[in-house]
């Protein structure tokens, strides 16, 4: 992955999180964080 592509993807991710927080509040991020934690734990089990 080139630096330009990584920068663009990072900016898109940060921008989408910022739009979500402005429009809907931070509750979605808490839910997604919990699901990400569960997914990481599930992946660690299969390692």
Image (cartoon, grey):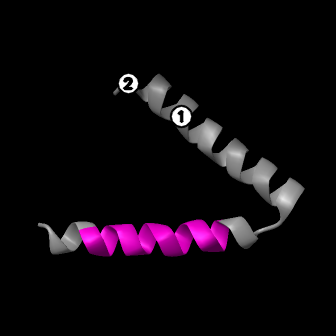
Residue at x 62% of width, y 38% of height: 11
Task: For the N terminus, give its image quadrant.
Answer: top left
Q: Seen in the image, is 43 located left or right of residue 34?
A: left
Whole-number angstrom distance, CA of label 1 to CA of label 2: 11 Å
Which labelled disc corresponds to residue 9?
A: 1
Query: Does residue 22 sit above or below 30 in this rendering?
Result: above
- Where is residue 32 drawn, in percent x and y? 57, 66
- Label 1 crowd bin: few (<14), some (14–19), many (20+), radius 10 Å: few
Q: Seen in the image, is 33 located left or right of residue 21?
A: left
Query: Does residue 30 sit above or below 15 in this rendering?
Result: below
On the image, which quarter does residue 38 sit in? bottom left
- Where is residue 44 drawn, in percent x and y? 21, 71
- Label 2 crowd bin: few (<14), some (14–19), many (20+), radius 10 Å: few
- Where is residue 19 drawn, in percent x and y? 80, 48
Mark 2 lies on a secondary structure that is loop
Mark 1 against mark 2, which lies toward the viewer? 1
Majority SS type along the magenta span: helix
Residue at x 27% of width, y 71% of height: 42
Q: Which residues are magenta?
A: 29-42
Mark 1 lies on a secondary structure that is helix
Numbered-mark total = 2
């Amino acid at each position: 992955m080139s630096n330009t592509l990584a920068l663009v993807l990072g900016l898109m991710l940060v921008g989408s999180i910022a739009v979500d927080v402005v429009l809907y509040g931070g509750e979605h991020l808490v839910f997604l964080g919990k699901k990400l934690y569960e997914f990481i734990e599930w992946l660690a089990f299969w390692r």
